[in-house]
Amino acid sequence: MSEEILKALMQLFAIIIKQDGGVEEKEKAYVRNFLNQQIGVESSEPYFRLFLETAITDNQGEAVEETRLTSVLDSVKILKLCKQINKTLNQQQKVVVLVRILELINSEYRITKQRQEIADTVAVVFRVSGLEYESIFNFVTTSEVNDIVDKNLLVISDREIMSPPYQHFRAGGIRGEILVLRIPSVELYFIKYFGNQDIFLNGLNVHKDVIYLLANGSTIRFARGQPFYYSDIRNQFHRDTAVQRITFQADSISYSYPDGYKGLHNISFTADQGTIVGILGSSGAGKTTLLNVLSGLYTPDQGAILVNNIDISRDPGLIMGTTGYVPQDDLLIEDLSVFDNLYYSAKFCFKNLSDKEIRKKVNDTLSSLGLLDKSDLKVGSVMNKTISGGQRKRLNIALELIREPSVLYLDEPTSGLASRDSENVMDLLKELTAKGKLIFVVIHQPSSELIEFGRGLMDHDKNQFS
């Protein structure tokens, strides 16, 4: 966040919590923690002083009355600050700010009429719908899961619940309950935990009753039991989403190299949408060759590759735009920003769209891959990095995803990545399958990174598909 927005937020926080009795220690701690998370401990002190000065100065000489109304001066200041913030933040950021405001006024469980009216005003200025605001308010303030009736709430627990008024997923090894709130208009997810065991979000301890943003690529881990990935949670809310039907068939394909050596021999299998097919094999076994034949880059000597019963070698024009290929090599232009790399690729692909439409498409794609906040960063070279290896790979995938292919081919997408980045890339692929995409991915080693995701595996050494 910019300096201007942080200053506005500190003043807004101060005006809110000075209502009905002033600043409590827990509220001070909340604001300090908020600043530390946003800009770090060293940079937060000036903003924290501004927060205290605003709260104390505005509160001097006023009698503390539980029933007093928010002053006209405070109301004017609130509207001015909200409009200032409204001009700068995107809608996702506004929703996050609204959640933090409600969490702040609930930090001492003192949501009085005056404080709630201010939060109501913020929601209106930020153009958050009434239904979504009600969901956020109930999620932040509830201390009992049974108090909520909301289809956009997911409860993860180790107990059976008959006909719950929210979505429920039973998972072993959890003491207590994890609540996940989805905000459909901006596709954001927030979590909070009711329980007393060690739970970790992206390696950091999750504290009871604290609200966390579940970002794209996040992982929730427990002392016992399987981890939950961002895609697992997202998929719970999108189980009934209709997708275009895609079928794939490799029918007795064989392929020979130019020197006559037969690289592929009589390979047959079928695959459906919503599946990751991993291609395994030893070094030099021809995994990339197989991927190239399956994608249509190489033409088989015999047999056929059929996508929706269309032979992709004989009639490639009929499946134009249906498939996408992400090579192992980096395709990014290092002197361009994250946004511009995708923007110029989209300009080339969508010559019939206006510049406004292309920019929206780019922003939507970056948002879906968790890269929107990196838009202005220069990509840099592979050796001189300004974004991580995992972010580079996601951006390479975005170059194809922006065309919205139904079938995606990737050659060793986790090669050279740190374990955390590798896990994020595989989680992204799992999320794409939930949207109905069929994905073929070459992996160098049969490690847990793919097996953990429980999809089809093709062992090229043994010519087996399972």
Image: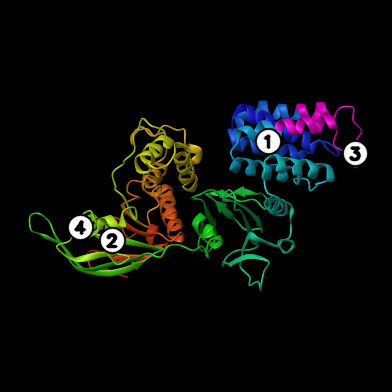
Instruction: Tell me the kind of residue under disc 2.
Output: Leu
Q: Determine the secondary structure under disc 4.
A: loop
Q: Determine the secondary structure under disc 3.
A: loop
The crowding category of the residue bearing disc 1, from other C-alpha atoms within 10 Å (few below 14, some 14 to 19, many at least 20), is: many
Circle on res. 68: 3
The crowding category of the residue bearing disc 2, from other C-alpha atoms within 10 Å (few below 14, some 14 to 19, many at least 20), is: many
Instruction: Tell me the kind of residue under disc 4.
Output: Gly
- What is the x, y in percent for residue 303? 19, 67
Discs 4/1, front: 4
The crowding category of the residue bearing disc 3, from other C-alpha atoms within 10 Å (few below 14, some 14 to 19, many at least 20), is: few
Residue behind mark 1: 32
Q: Which residues are magenta?
A: 53-81
Instruction: Tell me the kind of residue under disc 1.
Output: Arg
Tell me what residue is drawn at x 48 percent, y 50 percent.
217
Residue 37, quarter of picture: top right
Residue 76 is covered by the magenta coloring: yes
Q: CA distance from mark 3 to mark 1?
A: 28 Å
Q: CA distance from mark 4 to mark 2?
A: 10 Å
Residue behind mark 4: 286
Tell me what residue is drawn at x 70 percent, y 37 percent.
31
Is the image coloured rainbow, by chain, by secondary structure, or in one colour?
rainbow
Quarter placement of the N terminus:
top right
Residue behind mark 2: 280
